Image (cartoon, helix red, strand yellow):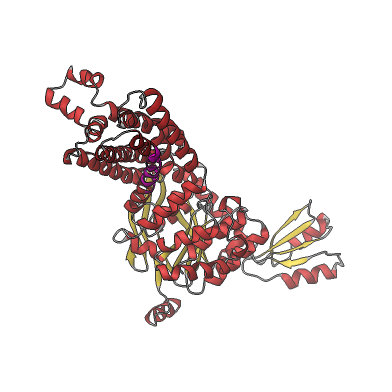
Amino acid sequence: MRQIKPIIKRELHSYFATPIAYVFIVIFLIMSGVFAFYFGGLYERGQADLIPFFNFHPWLYLFLVPAVAMRLWSEERNSGNIELLMTLPVHKMDWVLGKFFAAWLFIGLALLLTFPIWISINYLGDPDNGLIIASYFGSFLLAGGFLAIGSCVSAATKNQVIAFILSVVVCFLFLLAGFPMVLNFFKVFLPQIMVDAVASTSFLTHYDSITKGVLDLGDLSYFAITIAVWLYATSLIIDMKKAD
Amino acid sequence: MLLLLQHMSILRGVITIMIECLNLSKKFGQFTAVDDLSFTANKGQVLGFLGPNGAGKSTTMKMITGFLEPTSGKVKVCGLDIADDPIAVKSKIGYLPEGAPSYGEMEVGQFLHFVAPLRGIKPNLVKSAVESVISRVNLENVYFQKIETLSKGFKRRVGLAQAIIHDPEVLIMDEPTDGLDPNQKHQVRELITDMSKDKTIILSTHILEEVHAVCDRAIIIAGGKIVADNTPSEMEGMSRYHHAVSFVSDLDTELLNKIKQMNCVRDVAYDARLKETTVFPTQGLFIFDEISEFLRKQSIQVKSLKMEAGRLDEVFRNITQSMGEREVVK
């Protein structure tokens, strides 16, 4: 496990050695601002909270997180680098975790850089800062969930474009699992317990409850388990596909 | 006698088996890439893998380095089974994959500083390890350059540097000189020869002269099987050209026939374009003196007269093509 640190360091460094980091951060900041102010009416609502800001995060992540995740493994496979990585005396899980945490930290950094909006709202009124911190935390967890999915999809293909599109689709399904349009479909042929089970896999349901300020152990462990399962799947897929 | 000598040296600990492949097979679906392959390599040996494209050279190397798991069979490196302890085995190996992949956006120095701890070098020794490997493969001038901006030769040397940074006991290189210019090839070969004393080296190549230049044992692989395992000079001995005498001169058919009728001569070949005559001796004979004597007596103007050691490419073709035909017959 001591090998994770140099991997995280290298990955983070590579984000900033290429324009990826700057493009991502700038787009993320602009988009989150646009969504919050224009579509969410953050200012016009006349309420001192960041609910419109956080409400749009799932939709923002839906496209931006797969864009970060798509290169995690497919680029390594495409360049043949995977052969070097997998023959170094390093556990495979160290690579999976190192790459994942580096990307997660990177998205976390972008999220932290939205702090001006938090300062503004504190200047304008008297918001519930505990709720805002919980929401930031929930947003970070949501990004981690999307990222773990993206990591797994990226391991399955050499093509980054395919990795991106598939990740968006899979993330979209997980996001919407709690919505009536999905649940109504399942209600037709599944018993209520199963429908509830499908609904409980929804990212949105768990995210919403965290951003409402309810830090429930269930929601936290939901994200933790989701991330763990997708990362484990990543390591299995690397083994299956590395020779192609 | 030879066996006895080998036995004695094993007892004295001179010969240490470093790499052991036992009945190694690898199947990709229906396709058998490596088929029941067994060999051992000892300390200090430089072993060359030869074979046509798709013969299974790279696949074998990928199994030895732990990138691929064999479908059946065993790989032991330094006495350790790779299936039991892959991390321990990988830490004893330096591997240069085909095409020397690396991170293009990193500088040479950064890349080596990244690989060093992953290769198991302790944090306080990383700096000196990087410095020493940089000077060994002459990368001082490109230390701060991004790898993607380097020429092919330099990229290959960066790949070599990451493979030998931890001074591994076993070094495995997939086509280390492929695509390099003659000067770069020479440099890489010198490096390999330098390192060969205390390491076991396996390299694959298409270039037959390379086998002669650096290897002391050549294994020819075709169709996933070992079809020959000799020293390069033994392999040359298998050639039709072994001890043949060739010279450049204008000859008429009459003279050619005269040479052909000599007792010690098995056959004569004449290349009209190069005006080169090659005289093949009867099995095991040295005919250089006879031929030069004959040419002098006939007062024929000869441009170059030489005795051939044997042509590896011809041996290679004979062995691997007959292999291919056998498969067609099946």
Q: Which region shows up in magenta?
A: A102-116
A115 or B303: which is nearer to us? Answer: A115
Q: Is residue A115 magenta?
A: yes
Residue B234's quadrant in the figure?
A: bottom right
B266 or A92: which is nearer to us? Answer: A92
Q: Quadrant of the C terminus of chain B?
A: top left
Q: Residue at x 73, y 65 (%)?
A: B262
B312 or A215: which is nearer to us? Answer: A215
Please provide percent x and percent y for residue A201: 22, 32
Residue B25 visible in image: yes
Please provide percent x and percent y for residue B119: 41, 63
Q: Is residue A195 above or below residue B309?
A: above
Q: Residue at x 31, y 37 (%)?
A: A139
- Number of marks in picture: 0
Q: Is residue A100 above or below residue B96?
A: above
Residue A205's quadrant in the figure?
A: top left
Q: Is residue B268 above or below residue A21?
A: below
Q: Is residue A97 above or below residue A140?
A: below
The answer to whether residue A187 is left or right of residue A169 is left
Residue A244 visible in image: no
Q: Residue at x 39, y 27 (%)?
A: A37
Please provide percent x and percent y for residue B317: 58, 53
Q: Quadrant of the N terminus of chain B?
A: bottom left
Q: Is residue A91 magenta?
A: no
The answer to whether residue B162 is left or right of residue B260 is left
Please provide percent x and percent y for residue B296: 84, 70
Chief SS of the magenta region: helix
